[in-house]
């Protein structure tokens, strides 16, 4: 998923307000849907770690120092192994989860008297899980009164590869790289909330690292890329998101950079979220502040207050969304009930 719209500051006119408001409502509603299922997303992250195995959390860290060159060596397989197993785990407050897995590991090695030696490890793993109808987990506060009962299935497939080589000459040279790909699909029904949905995640993480101590001063550099794509189906409504984390470092130029973006797609539109602030969903009321880029306009700021959802999923029932550009235009969207068009009115500015 890619955002191809404008990323400069928007300069809105009064004629833009109704069209812009419709897009703002889309983004706020889509991001609000994600907030309504956050307690269950936390359980999905836990399940992902379970299906990946004990090293899963390590593999998906956001690496920041990696590089782009390696020794040129022919590698031969020196060892390989396959493993499989199954396990039944009890839910925190009832029910069971049946987990099973099958994985394989292959190790390769190469050596040259002039340039050094290298190891490569390739790991693949397929896992799945099935929940009993009374499978139950606590919410994030561990409160039994708010325990969530859901039933569903989960499938996981992934692979991990590592490469490392080093120079045996004086001073030392070291290079390492890794790549991780994983996909998780979970179908969930939350009985107590009347919620049905599907959680789909595709995750990649790669990085390179280089250090050469044969020079004075030593040279080291690196880069990393982590992409986390999610597709949520919430009572029939689909929200897609993509989080991208890029990092790089170069000791020679002393340049260090980081990029963190979130792209969200909902109801035919794609948005680039720069900042999420003041998020709250208490007592059925949503508060949400956003700084985001909109196709055709650029960066717009929004502040949603006391929004409530329509029971039929058609939109917002009550509440307001204020929005403004970086120059001189501000407006307020007011929701007047389900099935009633919201009103959009210019608001005083303090520019």
Image: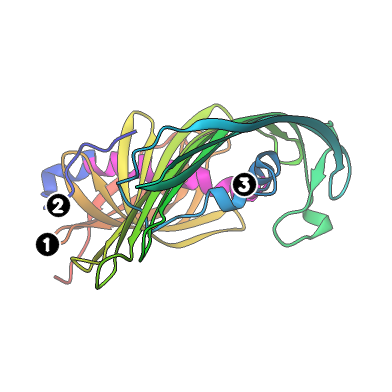
Say whether residue 134 is left or right of residue 111: right
Give the percent coordinates (x, y) of residue 286: 50, 55
Residue 198 appears in the picture as rendered: no
Give the percent coordinates (x, y) of residue 277: 41, 63
Crowd class of label 2 (few under 14; some 14 to 19; many from 20; radius 10 Å): few
Crowd class of label 1 (few under 14; some 14 to 19; many from 20; radius 10 Å): few
* Residue where numbered disc 1 is placed: 327
Q: Earlier in the sequence, mark 1 or mark 3?
A: 3
Q: Earlier in the sequence, mark 2 or mark 1?
A: 2
Return the residue found at the far front: 113
* Residue where numbered disc 2 is placed: 8
Which region of the structure is painted magenta?
A: 20-43
Say whether residue 342 is left or right of residue 285: left
Find out whether residue 278 is within the magenta segment.
Answer: no
Judged by depth in the image, the label closer to the viewer, 1 or 3, is 3
* Residue where numbered disc 3 is placed: 56
Mark pair 2, 1: CA separation: 12 Å
Judged by depth in the image, the label closer to the viewer, 3 or 2, is 3
Q: Earlier in the sequence, mark 3 or mark 2?
A: 2
Say whether residue 148 is left or right of residue 158: right
If the image is split into quadrants, where does the N terminus sit? top left
- Secondary structure under tag 3 reads helix
Q: Nearer the viewer, residue 77 or 45?
A: 77
Q: Nearer the viewer, residue 167 or 237?
A: 167
Image quarter for residue 323? bottom left
- Disc 1 and disc 3 in contact, CB within 8 angstroms: no
């Amino acid at each position: 998923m890619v955002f191809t719209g404008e990323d400069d500051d928007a300069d809105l006119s009064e004629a833009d307000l109704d069209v812009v408001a419709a897009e703002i409502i889309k983004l706020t509603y889509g991001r609000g849907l994600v907030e309504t299922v956050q307690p269950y997303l936390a359980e999905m992250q836990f399940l992902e770690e379970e299906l990946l195995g004990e090293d899963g959390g390590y593999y998906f860290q956001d690496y920041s120092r990696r590089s782009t060159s390696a020794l040129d060596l022919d590698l031969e397989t020196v060892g390989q192994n396959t493993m499989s197993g199954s396990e039944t785990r009890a839910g925190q407050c009832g029910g069971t989860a049946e987990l099973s897995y099958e994985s394989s590991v292959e190790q390769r090695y190469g050596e040259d008297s002039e340039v050094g030696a290298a190891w490569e490890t390739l790991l693949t793993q397929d896992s799945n899980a099935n929940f009993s109808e009374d499978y139950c987990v606590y919410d994030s506060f561990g409160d039994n009164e708010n325990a969530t009962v859901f039933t569903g299935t989960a499938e996981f497939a992934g692979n991990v590869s590592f490469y490392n080589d080093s120079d045996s000459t004086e001073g030392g040279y070291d290079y390492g790289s890794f790549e991780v790909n994983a996909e998780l699909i979970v179908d969930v029904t939350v009985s107590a909330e009347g919620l049905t949905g599907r959680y789909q995640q595709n995750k990649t993480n790669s990085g390179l690292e280089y250090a050469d101590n044969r020079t004075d001063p030593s040279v080291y550099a690196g880069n990393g890329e982590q992409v986390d794509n999610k597709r949520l189906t919430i009572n029939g409504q689909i929200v897609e998101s993509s989080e991208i984390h890029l990092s790089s470092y170069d000791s020679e130029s002393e340049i260090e950079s980081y990029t963190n973006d979130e792209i969200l797609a909902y109801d035919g539109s794609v948005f680039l979220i720069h900042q999420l602030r003041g998020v709250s969903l208490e007592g059925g009321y949503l508060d949400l502040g956003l700084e985001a880029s909109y196709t055709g306009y650029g960066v717009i700021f929004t502040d949603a207050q006391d929004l409530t959802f329509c029971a039929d999923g058609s939109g917002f029932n009550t509440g307001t969304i204020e929005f403004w550009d970086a120059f001189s235009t501000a407006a307020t969207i007011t929701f007047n009930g389900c099935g009633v068009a919201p009103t959009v009115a210019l608001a005083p500015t303090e520019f």
